[in-house]
Image (cartoon, rainbow, N blue to C red):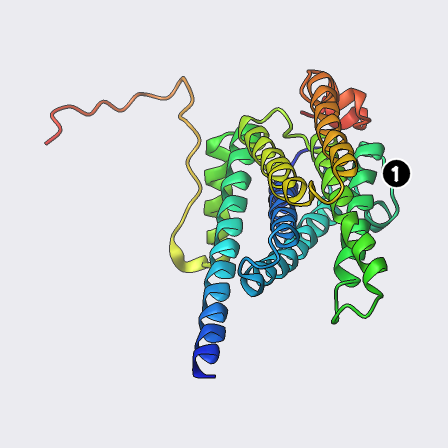
Amino acid sequence: MQDRDRTVARNRQTLRRLTVAAAGAAIGLNAVLLIQTSVIQVGPGAVQDAIVSFFGAVFPGGGLRAAQPPAAPSASPLVVTGAS
Amino acid sequence: MSSSPNVLWFVDRSAGEVTLLLLSAVVILGVARAAMPRARPVLLEGVHVNLGLLTIAFAGLHITAAILDPYARLGLLDATVPFVSAYRPTWTGLGVVSAYLYVAAVLSSWPARRLPRRIWIWLHRGMYAAWAVALVHSLGSGSDARNELFLLLDLAAVAGVLIAFLGLRVAEAWTALPPLWAALAAVALVTTLGVGIWAFNGPLQPGWAHASGTPPDLIRSR
């Protein structure tokens, strides 16, 4: 009787682990596919901006800012030399 | 109305692909359970049921994102009545049909299979049709059919279900009624080949967006 109870408990635990692993894998794959489709369609910069603005909206005091647009061709280039 | 894709459009597409993969896993586990009734039945059936519920969660996410997303302009009516949507009506409609077949299989199994076993088993076999129709829906209405990662996952899903059906179900039941199982194996192989040929000449070719019935203004906005 005890052996049977132990087997049932072990089966339940294995089932729980497998279910959690499958759910984790599904959520992870969903995130990968979501990022991949967005990067292909709108480009990595736009995705980065979207993620930053999402977190900026959720955590307003976090100090996150979207990437700055590239400098206009007429702007003076900043030359940095002698990096230490 | 929006003519450019937004995050909901991407959620719709990724959740749709995950739903197809989960549905494939549910079918494979169901086939394994039927073919090997003595092989850890509690565990096999438990994972089969739990993944079935997870499939409903992801299908819900897929449908909700499709309805809320302003890009493809799908509404509640398009999500519940097959073949009426303005966006790829045939292929979107197949998704609705697949959902109904799946819901029938799930609801008839719960609670505690109150239906007579013969009726239940035929409704449950509808899961094969739900999976095949979902695959065609995914290739036909998804705008990622030519995305290599999506294609690879679709191929893995098809290979998994086909191997499970032929290698487990047909192999196990073969001795009982060889002509029937030979015919079912042939149907599975011919259907797979047919879907492959259709996909190669349709969704995997340039111009499918137009041929599949995407509204012209959405094609122009890409």
- Residue B117: give x, y in percent of width and height: 81, 63
Q: Residue at x 83, y 44 (%)?
A: B97
* Chain letter behind tag 1: B
Q: Quadrant of the C terminus of chain B?
A: top right
Q: Is residue B43 left or right of residue B190?
A: left
The image quadrant that residue B185 belongs to is top right
Give the residue at the far front of this rendering: B175
- Residue A41: give x, y in percent of width and height: 57, 29
Secondary element at tag 1: loop
Give the residue at the far bottom of this rendering: A1
The image quadrant that residue B182 belongs to is top right
Q: Residue at x 63, y 61 (%)?
A: B49
Q: Eyeballing the image, is A36 above or below A74?
A: below
Q: Is residue B23 left or right of residue B130?
A: left
- Residue B211: give x, y in percent of width and height: 80, 20
The image quadrant that residue B106 belongs to is bottom right
Instruction: Give the camera-side residue of B53 and B62.
Output: B53
Number of numbered callouts drawn? 1
Residue under pointer 1: B83
Instruction: Give the camera-side residue of B140 and B44.
Output: B44
Q: Quadrant of the N terminus of chain B?
A: top right
Q: Eyeballing the image, is B218 above or below B135?
A: above
Q: Eyeballing the image, is B101 above or below B197?
A: below
- Residue B70: give x, y in percent of width and height: 73, 42
Residue B99, can we see it? no
Q: Amino acid at mark 1?
A: Phe
Q: Is residue B118 left or right of residue B21?
A: right
Q: Residue at x 66, y 53 (%)?
A: B34
Residue B84, can we see it? yes
Crowd around label 1: few <14 · some 14–19 · many ≥20 (10 Å): some
